[in-house]
Image: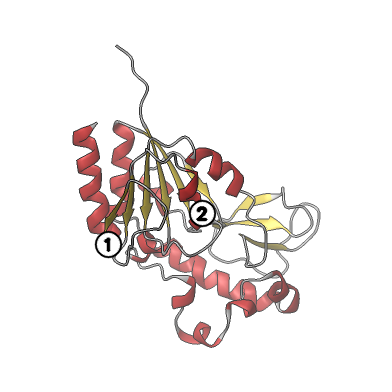
Amino acid sequence: MWCLMKKIVVLTGAGISAESGIQTFRDGDGLWKKYRFEDLATPEAWNRDPELVLEFYNWRRKKVWEAEPNAGHRALVKLEQKFDVQIITQNVDDLHERAGSKNVLHLHGELKKARSTVDPNLVYELKTWELKMGDKCEKGSQLRPHIVWFGEPVPMIEPAKNIVSKADIFLIIGTSMVVYPAASLVIYVLPDKPKYYIDPKAFPVGGISNLNVIKKTAGDGVPELVEQLMKGS
């Protein structure tokens, strides 16, 4: 007898990518430590010094090109054998996709893409980790990183809210739950639906019912939870 698969919605943050060697924005190394995010990841920074912004994102993009999915990413793919899985990620890397996840929504953009500075609908896949001054869209304007910068609207937040509201099970992985608007998504999950929060620094979120806190890394906690969910399905 055919039955509808339960829907698992997963919100992931920097913690899951960190285990693949991708540092968080605030963890940068070398010369980047002397810069504030206002100098590198805002529209004002782009207008002031686009070459510096491109250099910073080239450094980040190269790190992503060299990274590989970890046990946390791979475990989420396994869920697709028995569940309808939708991943919503705050991360700008493509490790979920490379691990094999089929449905991934990027809230904050994608490092391996660039977009036009005159037409945000013109988005291009990058073939290399470098994006340079002089790289232009078909309308002749400079390409910029396809990233939601600080101070810019998050266009995918409304679709994300809609997805979350339909979750039968909600997973939160590797995020501090303090970066908005992503952190607000949990309130759109129906109160009676089970929720799991996996992070070494995870904490009970006030006002959220049925929340199970798992103080483990994504590499350890996600495979364990996936096994539990697979057996109980």
Label 1 to label 2: alpha-carbon separation: 22 Å
Which comes before the other along the chain, label 1 or label 2?
2
- Rendered position, 62 above or below 94: below
122 or 103: nearer the viewer: 103
Number of numbered discs on residues: 2
Q: Which amino acid does label 2 sit on?
A: Ser
| Residue at point 34%, 59% (across, down) | 204
Colour basis: secondary structure
Q: Mark 1 points at which residue?
A: 217
- Say which element carries label 2: helix
**Residue 126 sits in which quadrant?**
bottom right
Q: Mark 2 points at which residue?
A: 184
134 or 25: nearer the viewer: 25
Badge 1 density bin: few <14, some 14–19, many ≥20, Cα 10 Å: many
Q: Position of residue 220 (x, y in %)?
A: 22, 57
Which quarter shows the N terminus?
top left
Indicate left or right for 24 with 58 as reference: left
| Residue sitting farthest toward the top | 1
Q: Which amino acid does label 1 sit on?
A: Thr
Q: Of discs 1 and 2, which sits in the foreground?
A: 2
Which quarter shows the C terminus?
top left
- Say which element carries label 1: loop
